[in-house]
Image (spheres, rainbow, N blue to C red):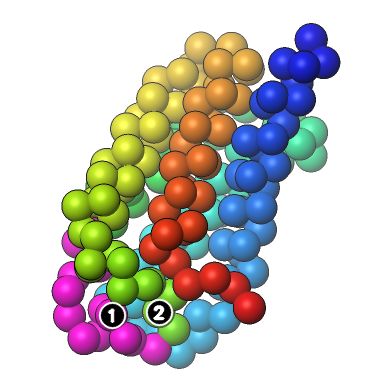
Amino acid sequence: MRQRMTQSIKPLTMAAIFVAGTVIAAYGHGGATGIVKERMDGMMAMGKALSVVADMFKGKTGFDGVKIGDAAKIVRAHAAEIDGLFPDTEASRKGKGTEALPAVWDKRSDFTAIAVELEKRAAELEVISVSGDQNAIRVGFAAMAKTCSACHADYRKKKQ
């Protein structure tokens, strides 16, 4: 039992780090406009949604499958828009406040594959959320958060 809890805590820790980084990043996005602001707004919406779920698994709030489903729906909807939020334009590549690395455009098929995977993982979590099976939901959430982290690792500028 202890080993099982430890295995599920690591992905949740990664998710918490991702959420904290997203929230902190909100303060650094002042002045962004156009497509850069649009995608930042979407990322912030996903971060807030993930934060709601992470708080449940950290024991800060009570478990609520409906809220988890709602969070997954927000992530799924935004994941479906990610490809369009990174057009290969000067404004998208170098707009004020952008954190996107050139790899977004240089490795486009890999980048979009992660967005598709995120949409899939979010859809799975949305379905699982109604089951009430907290362990299955925890595993689904960790898989979704790991996909977010994978994209940030290769396609977003590192924080200083």
The residue lying at 70 percent from left, 42 percent from top is: 13
The answer to whether residue 45 is seen in the rendering is no
Q: Are marks 1 and 2 in contact (CB under 8 Å)?
A: yes
Q: Judge whether residue 16 is colored magenta.
A: no
Q: Amino acid at mark 1?
A: Arg
Q: Secondary structure at mark 1?
A: helix
The residue lying at 63 percent from left, 35 percent from top is: 11
The residue lying at 40 percent from left, 34 percent from top is: 122
Packing grade of label 2 (10 A; few <14, some 14-19, many >=20) is many
The residue lying at 44 percent from left, 83 percent from top is: 97
Cα separation between marks 1 and 2: 7 Å
Q: Amino acid at mark 2?
A: Thr
Where does residue 141 sit, x and y in percent of width and height?
54, 32
Look at the image and tell me in which quarter the C terminus lies.
bottom right
The answer to whether residue 157 is seen in the rendering is yes
Q: Which residue is mark 2?
A: 98
Where does residue 96 sit, x and y in percent of width and height?
39, 88
Q: Judge whether residue 89 is colored magenta.
A: yes
- Whether 99 is drawn above or below 67: the answer is below
- Whether 114 is drawn above or below 159: the answer is above
Q: In this image, 71 relative to 54: left or right?
A: left
Q: Range of the magenta residues?
A: 83-96
Look at the image and tell me in which quarter the N terminus lies.
top right
Where does residue 7 sit, x and y in percent of width and height?
69, 24
Q: Which residue is mark 1?
A: 93
